[in-house]
Image: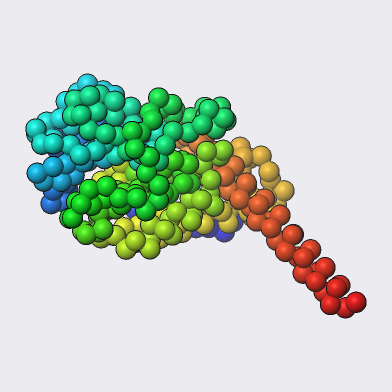
Amino acid sequence: MQGDISHLTGILRPSPEVAAKLRHSANYGAAESVAPGIRRILAGNAKDYTGPGTNTYVVGEDRVFIIDPGPACDAHIAAVMRAVDGRPVDGILVTHTHADHSPAAGALRMLTGARTYGFGALSADILALTDEDVDADFVPDVKLAHGHSVGTGAWRIDAVHTPGHFPNHLCYLLPHTGVLFSGDHVMGWSTTVVVPPLGDLADYLRSLSLLEGLGAGLMLPSHGPEVADPVGRIRTVREHRLMRHAQVADCLRRGLRRPSDIVAVIYDGLTPRLITAAEGCVRAHIELIDRQTEGEAATAKAATLATCHAGT
Ligand SMILES: [Zn+2]
């Protein structure tokens, strides 16, 4: 079996044990300074896939933005308001509408009078395709597309559309300081789950390259600690994904097709309650391999036809 991952230190599979360890050392309710003018407030919604919980960021000096409101939990909303500390809030920015990111936007909007920003809600048709925990109620006051900016000067924030984990996922970049808010696309504590139909592996890899090209100097994810070497981390995440891709392709070549069979082969010692997510990730790889195979077949057919025509 190809794909030894022992050298990929620092990449962790979402794990209840790791999440519990992070939860134990977490500083819930406090506003921690993570960079000049940027404070992080950790929500108490630790779960298997959120690690210690959701990070909400308060960004700015005299005036501030809030990035990723988090869950609609009273204690968390009160902690965010303490970090705002009476300063005017110019906007509430949402990375995406998974239920651990956007639900507090409504309460914070009422408390601060700020407008909400995000890529936009998913259509009912798309929502009907998934049983993921999605905040279907969040509709931003202002829709952001890739390349849109909010704020000015040192506190200008650029929106970077990064589908792959979730279709309406935005990362946010402070171009003047090279700080990247990476949402769930690249996390600080584990790899990210990419599960079809809302998750798409080809999009995920494309978005990784987009983030790599930003050359950020500090990455602040929505789960887990800050990342001092964003480019290194992005490359490691990509290497891990491609390693899994090779493992799944190898299984398909050997005649395995059912995600549960493939998970049993390529995931060593997987915690039983993470099996469903692992199967989802395997489906993302199979989907991409099928598309690649169809693409190769179409290219080969076109080349054959071209040869035939050239010969006539
Ligand atoms: Zn998410």
In the image, taking residue 222 as reference, residue 206 lies left or right, namely right
Q: How many marks?
A: 0
Position of the N terminus, as image quadrant, is bottom right
Which residue is farthest right?
Answer: 312
In the image, taking residue 43 as reference, residue 243 lies left or right, namely right
**Residue 311: x %, y % from top left:** 88, 78
Q: Nearer the viewer, residue 300 or 154?
A: 154
In the image, taking residue 118 as reference, residue 29 lies left or right, namely left
Q: Quadrant of residue 69?
A: top left
Identified at 72% across, 64% down, the residue is: 299
Name above or below for residue 139 compared with residue 187: above
Q: Nearer the viewer, residue 21 or 248?
A: 248
Position of the C terminus, as image quadrant, is bottom right
**Residue 249: x %, y % from top left:** 63, 54
Specify whether residue 27 is in view: no
**Residue 134: x %, y % from top left:** 44, 29
In the image, taking residue 95 as reference, residue 65 lies left or right, namely left
**Residue 74: x %, y % from top left:** 22, 21
Identified at 24% across, 38% down, the residue is: 91
Identified at 57% across, 30% down, the residue is: 125
Which residue is farthest top?
Answer: 74
Specify whether residue 153 is in view: yes
Q: Nearer the viewer, residue 115 or 32?
A: 115
Chosen colour scheme: rainbow
